[in-house]
Image (cartoon, rainbow, N blue to C red):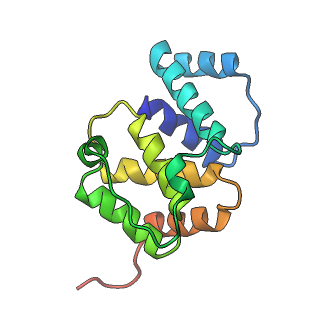
Amino acid sequence: MFDVLMYLFETYIHTDVDAMVDQEELADELTQAGFHKEEILKALAWLERLAALQEVGETPVCTRSAPDSFRIYTQEELYKLDAEGRGFLLFLEQIKVLNAETREIVIDRVMELDSSVMELDDLKWVILMVLFNVPGSESAYHQLEELIFEQPEGLIH
């Protein structure tokens, strides 16, 4: 499922392709690209749930916490998000790329993925997908994009 999401993000979103595609048409295109129907349906459902999280009253309950609160992870979240991933989420909160709401949406979307453990590089892509889809997060999206893709200049000692 994650491969389908990455394909969609890179093909339609990250490349700035401005196209509204019918879901059946999109599923056919993804099938022709070599993805299995079951994975395609899971990915489309994942994206629909991401869109639904933007609606009033649909955001995770945890997003209603105080801005200075501390996030305690469940056992399942601890297993799926290793220390490196949780540290990266905390870092992004500290530099104001993520807030409590977007962090919870990221965690919600990570927990819905098929993989048992989330690699840091995959987590970064999930965060980009979330920030791209959350209204008002354009600046945070671009900041994260620069953080991930910008190559250091000069010599590294």
Look at the image and tell me whether residue 136 can be seen. Answer: yes
Residue sitting at x 38%, y 47%: 122
The residue nearer to you, when weighing 75 against 35, is: 75
Instruction: Provide residue 41's location: percent of width, then percent of height.
Output: 53, 19
- Residue 12 in the image: state x and y as whole percent: 64, 40
Viewport quadrant of the N terminus: top left
Q: Which of the 4 image quarters holds residue 18? A: top right
Q: Locate residue 154 relative to residue 142 in the image: left or right.
A: left
Compared with 58, 147 (above or below) is below
Question: Which residue occupies 66% across, 45% down?
Answer: 54
The foreground one among 60 and 20 is 60
> Would residue 58 be found to the left or right of residue 98 on screen?
right
Image position of 98 with respect to 135: above or below = below
Where residue 125 appears, x then y in whole percent? 46, 50
Is 147 located above or below residue 24 in the figure?
below
**Image quarter of the C terminus:** bottom left
Q: Residue at x 43, y 48 (%)?
A: 107
Across and down, in percent, residue 123 comes to 39, 50
